[in-house]
Amino acid sequence: MRGLLRWLRAALVLAVACIPMGAVAEDGYQLWLRYRPLPDAQRAHVPDSILAVGVTSPTVEAARAELRRGLQGLLGRELALVPQARANTLVLARGADLPAALDDAPAVRAALRQLGNEGYLVRRARLNGVPVTLVAANADIGLLYGSFAWLRQLQLGTPAEGIALASRPTLPLRVLNHWDNLDRSVERGYAGESIWNWWELPGILDPRYLDYARANASLGINGTVLNNVNAKAEVLGAPFIAKAAAVAGLLRPYGIKVYLSVRWSTPLELKETRSADPLDPEVAAWWKRKADEIYRSIPDFGGFLVKANSEGQPGPQDYGRNHADGANMLARALAPHQGIVMWRAFVYASPEEARAASKGKDAPGAIHDRATEAYAQFQPLDGKFDKNVLVQVKNGAIDFQPREPAHPLFGAMPRTPLMMEFQITKEYLGFATHLAYLGPMFQETLGFDTRIGGRSLSVAQVVRGEQAGRVGGIAGVANIGSSRNWSGSTFDQANWYAFGRLAWDQGLDSRAIAREWAAQTFSPDRRLLDPVTDIMMRSREAVVDYMTPLGLHHLMGTGHHHGPAPWVDNLERADWNPVYYHRAGRDGIGFDRGPRGSNAVAQYAPEVARRFASPATTPPSLLLWFHRLPWDHRMASGRTLWEELVARYDHGVAEVAAMQAEWQRLRPLVDAERFEEVAQRLAQQHREAQWWRDACLAYFQQASGLPLPAGVRPPAQPLEHYRSLSFPYAPGHG
């Protein structure tokens, strides 16, 4: 351990020493932590020395290193670490170590009492009569978070003398889920290989891990699940525990705990038990021994993430048990170490069960609907999970679609702590090719009113435990890989950033976050900032329009999910086929989730269910999610449903063309490397948006038998051409 800390300190010194003082090629590696020189007018009152008060630690060393790195970049000169405050010093101090000579120390201590262990306070102050900038916190990690927050404000152009911050996270658990495999492939990853080089670990620690830790700590992300939810048993063997321990040691000073995804049948597959039955004492004892083994190597290990009885993964239902039986058995193994279980609610029935449920499809409420299954399995278990179990629920009930209504479970499990699961990597939104800023999607879901218990309670409030005091967390499926720019494209970095900022504070506005990211990533120059923010805020809606408008969903290609394939109807499971979801025919289109269909609306609170049960009160953006309607259904726009669908597809393509044009106008304000990278991707996005529009309209025109509205451009190719396209090497299979 001491050797690892020595390595960390050496790496921090090397990182600061290697800060380039001149022009730097903008390849995206530095993310939003670029620290480019401030204009002369903004340099007044920016500290040029740093004082850390009290006992040092690896976390305080990380904070000081980041401040040196940041200020040397922003001021363009070396900084001093001083033994006592002088004019223009930045002072790092825990509340318990506040110097007696600090003015208004009682008020600072009072403010800190409201900020918990992770919160921070930043303010101008006087120490021994000298003006200083104070970063104060109750714990070392708060000092690190406060340092990053202060540097963020400087990068945004805030005058140093005007920075006054007090913040604490609204959720205690803010986690990235890496769907990274042990061979370095990444399931649904579009940014190269996994950053975890399992082959070289534990002996070789890539310096990139340190920059990963810095980036996450700058957002307040405090956990990372290192491996894919489709886990392998080997990850719990001694060699991989040692590898995870090496990563944990490097991330620890940045407040980041490591977690592991575990395969339910691990002890059985390793031939160390005769079953994987959670009620078998032999199985429970194995997991307890394994937990003890892990904590001997990783004392602050976070716990397990589990995908069970879903998509072919083994689980407790294999033995006639339920999800609570399985989760609680693991939770009891982890409880002595304060570990947690994050048990995913992404489940749906076996093919046989799905076929059986579909037999009575004409009877009210009998239509098989994958969207209802997680609720059916988990809601009856509300209150039956141990206190260190969190049920991790996807933002929507299907599967990370461009748009879904919030999952009904968020309004149905008041006695169970819930975790939100977002997908940062864009499995269904054009991979790293398409510009789609997901901040509005995250905000849309977090702000959804569940009406739980008859009260107005947003999803964010539910996750925070405001309905019954059961505090949950938030997880994001990472888009990080070995690509030099981390996420495969410059603008996909914004989704990592937006997730982290909203994980810290769900009340933040997605437009403000976009502007914040753009200012740090490009420039706070309003000539660039205003149009870039506008592009970002329009982008996700454009993708929805040219892929899945009006509540359509799951129209993507089979397996790889690249490109349109609304015609697919031959897969093993009915609910893997796009035709299952859109049901387009001569008489109409859409999935009936009302009382005469699957009755999925009944899983929401009565007030929400009534709104979604009628086409007249369902938002147009979700119309075909909840209703199957005739093509001549009259929309609020005055158009028929068919005309509206065509118009949405055309609008999506036009929006991408407008984004392209806007970006071209920014050429003089953006470095050449990143300008060209974005320009190429927007050009490809425009081509693929046209492809989506043409293929879907060709198919839906054939299904409906209707002519295109007057003046509408017909698809460039016949339907048979689009159906013939094949993509055996699309990325992200994992």
Image (cartoon, rainbow, N blue to C red):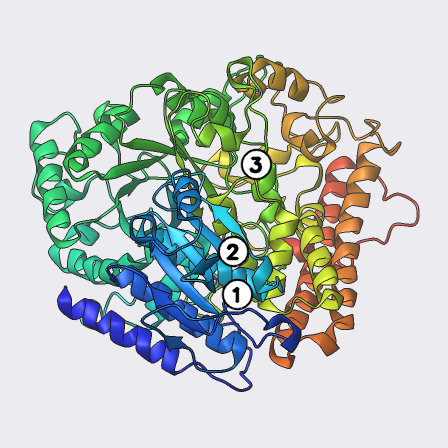
How crowded pointer 1 is (Cα within 10 Å; few <14, some 14-19, many 20+) is rated as: many
Q: Residue furthest right?
A: 710
User: Quick check: 391 above or below 161?
Assistant: above
Left or right: where 246 falls relative to 643: left
Q: Marks 1 and 3, how far apart in space?
A: 25 Å
Task: Measure the C-alpha gap from mark 2 to mark 1.
Answer: 8 Å
**Residue 75 can be seen in this image:** yes
Task: Say which quarter of the image contains residue 507.
Answer: top right
- Residue holding disc 3: 445
Q: Are marks 2 and 1 in contact (CB under 8 Å)?
A: yes
- The percent coordinates of residue 109 (x first, y second) are 38, 44
Element on which disc 2 rests:
helix
State which tag comes first along the sequence, 1 or 3.
1
**Alpha carbon of mark 2 to alpha carbon of mark 3: how far?**
17 Å
| Residue 449 as seen in the image, left or right of residue 141 | right
Between residue 590 and residue 399, name the one nearer to us: 399
Residue 357 placement, left or right of 159:
left
> Which residue is depicted at the point 67% across and 32% down?
622
The residue type indicated by label 1 comes to Trp
Residue 497 tag number: 2
